[in-house]
Each structure stands twice: as structure tokens, then as C-alpha cells.
Image: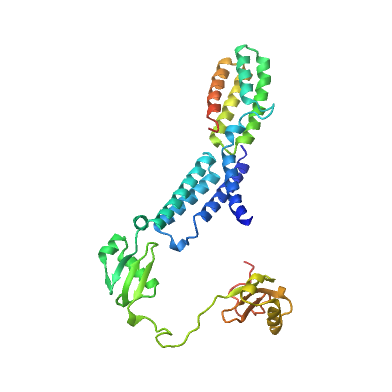
Amino acid sequence: MKKFLLYFIPLLTLAIFIAVMNSGAFLKQPLGNDDRLYESIQHIEAGVKNKDWSEVKAEAATMEKAWDKIVRRIQFSVEKEQLLEIDGTIARIRGGVEAEDDQSVLEEIYYYYGQWEQLAR
Amino acid sequence: MNETVVVIVRVIISFFTLLIFTRLLGKQEVGQLTFFDYINGITIGSIAATLATDLSAKAWAHWLGLVGYALLTGLLQYITIKNRYLGKVLDGEPTVVIEDGKILETNLGKMRIKMSELMTLLRSQQIFDITQVEYAVFEINGELSVKQKPEYLPVTRKDLQIPTKTGRLATEIIQDGIVLEQNLTQRHKDREWLQQQLQAKQINDVKQISYALILPDDSLYIDTFKDNIGKETEMGDYDGPY
């Protein structure tokens, strides 16, 4: 039993470390109803295209909350700069929504899609 | 991103990965490391430190680098043990640098050692007269092994034909007031014997003892927590505290 634990504990430790460091790709996906960031941004895109600014503004708040939740989960497996970049993109989307500037919002949304693809890869 | 939490998690990953890999890579002492082993160790340590604190890159990338270095180190260790020729190619081999008091300049040059360094290494071996040296070998870990000419070697018990006894090792039997039963049995002693020995030294409780050994000649060495020493050996020049 002792010999088994002698090998099992280090192997388990390494396995947990590997899982933590690679968990980002899984943990960026929605695990509940309030962390659906990608869907939220797709709603914003649809809203902007339809010029439905009241709905877009409500969705922008949801987007920010969802992002905050995802960051807490993936911070151990991604680069700090990547998180800061997406932080910036989300802030610019929010600004564009407040200004009701559909062109800048759409630019940022498509920039975000690219960042999301690269996140935790 | 909560940097504090992330760094703490990364420190845990880095620390225990390093611990596991260094245990796997064996117990080579620092003094026995070759120049390459030394640099390799520094590189592994540096990657581990970066893994813990450099948040600008993924922990996984650093961790893979760490594993890569550890695996290659393990592989080279295996090769040097299994294949004598490759072992010599990878680790180098000991080189004679002084023979019969004469410095072998070509070998010295191959090992990139300066004359002054050679003299320093000799002096560190208590050799102040190079003519006393029969052979000096520069080892792969950077140390100099010196064989003096027989006429300069100290006389041994064998030379004088004085009978000797083969020595044994000392065995710990008490540590911090706890009797180590297993070690006591190893030396074919029991609690009763221990009690008698302690009573002979006026010690009533084993808890008063910090450390006790059975010496090679079967006598008992005891160090109690109370040292009862005066201030004569006090080294400090000031009252302190400092």
C-alpha cells in the first residue's frame, strides 16, 4: 500500500497540475445560464444589425457579467495579456453600445470572435 | 484576473513539479555535478521560477519546458550509465595534469585550466610543493585528485603493524525524547538495557534526552536538553538582542 501511494501521489499531483493548466479550453465554455459570453455577444451583434439599442444595452450588461465569471475560471491556464486584451475589447463594445455606434461595435465584435478562438488554445 | 491567486497556484505547481522531478532524477550531490549538470540545474530552476511568476505566458508552456529539460536530463543520465563510450563523450573523462611532479601543459590546455588555478587546487589539497605530487588528476566535476609520492605520505597503522579493529556505525536510539525501538533492536539491545544505562548516568526520564547514540564500541552517547554550560564560551561581543 505504501509503495502504491509512493507512486500514486506524485502521479496524481502531476495529473492535477496538467488538468489545471489545460482546463481553459473547457472552462471558457458556458457551465450555467449567466456565463454565456459568446451567445451574449451574438445577441448584441443581432441587436446592432436590427438597431434594437435598448435590447443591446441590456445584453451588454449580461456580457460583462458573463466575462467576469469566465475570467475567474480560466485565469490559471491563459496568458494575462490575452485576458487584458479581451477586457479591452469588451469595454470598447460597451462604449460603442452606449454611443449607439453600430460600426465600431461590429468591428469590435468580430475582433472579439477572433480573440475568443485563440483563447486557451 | 486575480494575480495573487494565480501566482499562488503557479507557485504550488512549480514547486511540487520541481520536487517530483528532482527526486526522480536521483541523488547526485552538488559537489559531484559536472559543469553541464550545474548549468542544466540552473536552467531548470530558472524555468521553474518563470513558471511561477511570469503571467505573460501560459503556465503550460513553461511546464512543458521544465518537463522537457527533466526528461532529457534523465535520458542522458540513463545513456551515460548504460553506454560507457557515450558516457565519456557526454561527461568527459578524468585527465592527468601532473605526473611525477611535472605539469602536463597539453592536458591542462585541453581542460582549459590556468596554471594559477592548478596551484590553487593543489594548495586546497594541502600540497604546497609540486614536487611531492606523483599524479594529479582533474576530475569531471572540476575537482583535483592528488596522489602524493610514497615518501611524502603519512605513516599508517599498517606500516607500524599496529593491530586495528573494524569499525561499525553509530546508531541513533533516542531523538527528541522518543526511543527509536527499531534501531535499538538492530543493535541487539532492549528497553531494560537502555534504562540501566540511563540510571547509571542519573537520568530518570527519557524525555530529558535530546539525542542519544550507541557508539561503535557499544557505549552510549547522551545529549540532554539541559546543557549546563556557563557563559565562558559565549562568542558575542554585545549583550544583544540581535
Q: Residue A94: in sight, yes or no? A: no
Camera-side residue: B95 or A74? B95
Instruction: Residue B101: name its quadrant.
Output: bottom left
Is residue B4 positioned above or below B81 on the image? above
Q: Is residue A78 left or right of residue B226?
A: left
Seen at 38% across and 63% down, the residue is B142
Location of residue B234 in the rendering, given as x and y in whole percent from the top left corner: 60, 76
Location of residue B59 in the rendering, given as x and y in whole percent from the top left corner: 54, 41
In the displayed image of the protein, which residue is found farthest to the top? A50
Location of residue B46 in the rendering, given as x and y in whole percent from the top left corner: 48, 49
Quadrant containing the C terminus of chain B is bottom right
Which colour assignment does the render follow?
A: rainbow
Quadrant containing the N terminus of chain B is top right
Instruction: Residue A26: name its quadrant.
Output: top right
Is residue A83 positioned above or below B105 on the image? above
In the displayed image of the protein, which residue is found farthest to the front? A1
Q: Residue A21: in sight, yes or no? A: yes
Is residue B126 positioned above or below A6 on the image? below
Is residue B68 positioned above or below B235 on the image? above
Count of residue discs: 0
Location of residue A65 in the rendering, given as x and y in whole percent from the top left corner: 67, 28
Camera-side residue: B42 or A100? B42
